[in-house]
Amino acid sequence: MLTLFLLLPAVGALLALFLPKERAQDAKWIALVFSGLAFLVSIAVFVLYNPHVEGYQFVDTFDWITADTAGFAISYTVGVDGLSAPLVLLLGLLSVVSVLVSWRIDVKEQQYFAWLLFMETAVAGVFLSLDLIQFFLFWELELLPMFMLISQWGSGRRLYSATKFLIYTLAGSAFMLVGFLVLGATAGTFEIAELVATPVTEAAVPLTLVFWAIMLAFLVKLPTFPLHTWLPDAHTDAPTAVSVMLAGVLLKMGGYGILRIALPILPQQAHDARWILATLAGFSVLWGAVITLRQTDLKRLVAYSSVSHMGYVLLGVSAMGAVGLSGAAMQMFTHGTITGLLFVVVGLIYDRTHTREISQMSGLMHRMPVVGTVFVIAGLASLGLPGMSGFVAELTTFLGSLEVHPVATMAGIFGVVLSAGYILWTVQRVLHGPATEKWRDLTDATSWWEITAMASLVIVILAVGIYPPLLTNAVEAGIAPIAQIIEGVS
Amino acid sequence: MTALAAALYIGPAVALYIGAGVVLLADLVQGRRAATGLLSLVALAVAALWAIVQMGSGAEGPILHGALVADRFSLFFTFLLVATTAAVIVGTSEWASRVEDRGEFYALLLVSVGSMVLLAQSNDLITLFVALETTSLAQFILAGIARNERSSEAGLKYLLTGSIAAAVLLYGFAFLFGMAGTTALPGIAEFVRHAPEGLRLPLIMSFVFVAAGIGFKMAIVPFHGWVPDVYQGAPTPVGSFLSVASKAAGFAVVLRLFYSGLGGAETLITEDWGKLFAVLAVASMLFGNIGALVQTNVKRILGYSSIAQAGNIAVGVAAVAAASTVGPSGVLFFLGTYAATNLGAFIAVNAVSERLGSDDIADYAGLFKRSPMTAVVLSLCLVSLTGLPPTAGFIAKVYIFNGAIQTGQWWLVALVAVAVVNTAISAFYYLRWVRTMILDEPTDDRTIETPGGAQAVLLLASVGVLFFGVWPTPLIEAAQRAAAALLPA
């Protein structure tokens, strides 16, 4: 089933590419059908996932490279647990949303949708892989589609931003490969489950170095202050759908990598690093929030708020306890839906106003009540209003980290105050105020694809906010074994 | 050892030499009407068939009083070199049909590849040197065969640097002979294994000279000066032959010499030459990648890229010093995938430059619209050179780096760290080129026709790049069997 989830988008991408030229506009239908089918599979995975059963479920495996004599036996193994199941669902959902918000793309549609679908396959591979080399393969596979999408269909300094994204990610993942190879050479296997079961205690190079080599890739991807500068550029210049995917699922690859690989395989080194991680987290939250406050570009504003909000993920991780880790895992899911929705709304506004300058906008609520209302919902969810999904995640994170890192947690809580500030201020500047003459002819979102894209995300945000066990059941089952390992060291 | 058995062992090389003679004769008799290209392909096919028979008969061992040795290792290179040359001939047949001296072109190509096959079989310093010089002499003329100013300059430059390299190599050989008292590699290996500590310095000097001499063939820094100029100046088919076949032959010699000839992995100088290659690898990767960043001529980009790739392969050679079989098999696997990848890139560039009359990267803008197949294959090859999945280049890099790290030596871990950072640098120029071809708007809407022969080679190259990227096990196993043959029995 998981292999099906992995392959569906790739098949769709090939079909879209080989569509005859005169039917190029049908590429979006192919993309919708295949991402939709993948979404159905992801729902099935999430619903059928049983939190009471230990270990990975729906495992598909076969020996991929069988050069045992060279210590190069690599298996293709996919499976989900409570940590990855919600992310698979998130990926399925956001892929459909990103296809929907691309409905009006009219430049090289075939290639555009093909790259988008290829990216879904790559990210799915990252979330599903249970073998380090396979994980690395999919991690690298995601680069090319992203580079192509930003550099061609983006705006502004798109080539600069795409290249910056590429260099940052590649520089990070380069060291990750070295770390993985050292682990594999020492343990004699690349399988994550085996590496977790039999911890590596000594290697050719100090394990602390290995830990940071691996973490670097994840911290860049998350992103963490001071490695975050590629993100605002990439977001600002990316097309809407790519921003949705970037904020929604690509950043989660970083958090997922920390929880799946760095923590359980090198628990001692992770535990030793908890103060550094907490400090980085505190800085990310505060620095991100302060920078967000002074943004004048609507999309850049949402991008910087991501830096701040992903800081909570790292804060939860740095607590090194079951509650904090669950908070981090939940924050990844909720941030994906909320920020995804924010980027959808910002994209819809930009489609109509053709500007992202906040100072240019005023009283948009009068012209587009639907878009405005969804903006408010997403904004409130983003600042952590009770009853929305963001609240559950942030509260859990703080509960987990308060005792261990009081100062960083205080910084985090202050970050929430700041985020209330910038969200409400933005809502006030963009949506309220006098309805200017300039925006008299703006139309509201009425087409089915716009409504579906927004509604699906709003429903998920509210559902998780009102009934958190929808998410927490799975997440807690997934976090439990990791927390057990990490709490075992001191 | 009967004469018949010896003939069986050296058959492939003999077939290629005879082929060269027949081509020249046909050219002499029939002039420009002679089907010299076809004759060359026949010679290559005979050589390949002969090698298959040789493999099937399981005949292995030293021949001609130990001057040559036929084993899995030499067979691996025979197949690699013959396939490479055949691909060059088929892929550039259209170019060759317009060359005045194409009879000579094909004959020299066959002489060169025949000598390379012998080179992979050489088990004695003298045969090794003779084979190396024969292949080099043919290549000097090939580089200058276009007879224009740039091509002549390339040929002369290649000749001058090549002669110096040969002299240096011979000097290193003289040291080895002086100490060991024999030119046979097994004898030298035996001597090195039991060499007293006092001979360490002379031994180091000898292998430094040898590495310098062969470094010229492998195109690693600091013996690389000729590469960008020759790749740019020489006709592209010659460039593709040099970048793939000549480099492969260079690494074959290095593996044979350093791994079997200098006594394997447990002598007093093993770590010394391992570290020498580590330093050469770092220099090649840095110089090649940084040099390629600022180039706007596609042939020069490929030239610098080939220096950087030689550095990647040298990582595997350095690992040989510390590992047993993983290092050499990594080098062999890398060379195999690199052949498919770089041939694809060179043949594509040749097909495009022929039509455009330009090697400027700006003229590749929108190639996807003008010649979709060429653009896709070239992109695939560039992605593979970067080392990104799902291509063979990805597996090759992970495999060779894995071999280095498995040794558990900290300096090899550090070497791999430098190598992966270089991968990130190389992505910059490889992917920029891909983006230019796939996404930019063409300046000229006319379609570019790719000749049939080139199309066939491009198709094969892309199948190879993808197939070994998804299912590398067969090639890895072949590489391991070949590498195992190198171990001193």
Image (cartoon, rainbow, N blue to C red):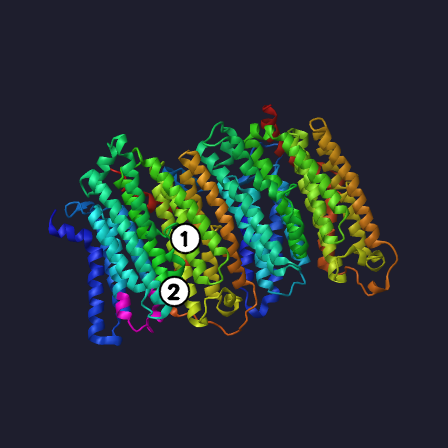
Tell whether position B95 is magenta: yes
Tell whether position A60 is magenta: no
Quadrant in the picture for the C terminus of chain A: top right
Residue at far left of view: B2
How far apart are the alpha carbons under marks 2 and 1? 16 Å
Mark 2, Cα crowd under 10 Å, few <14 / some 14-19 / many 20+, is many
The segment highlighted magenta reads B87-106
Marked residue chain, label 1: B
Give the numbered dot on residue B233. 2
The kind of residue tagged 1 is Ile
Helix, strand or loop: magenta stretch? helix
Give the numbered dot on residue B284. none
Q: Answer yes or no: is residue A375 visible.
A: yes
Left or right: residue A153 versus residue A393 is left
Tell me if residue A225 comes above or below residue A26 in the rendering.
above
Left or right: residue A122 versus residue B266 is right
Label 2 or label 1, whichever comes before in sequence order = 2
Give the numbered dot on residue B307. 1
Residue at far right of view: A434
Tell me if residue B484 comes above or below residue B220 in the rendering.
above
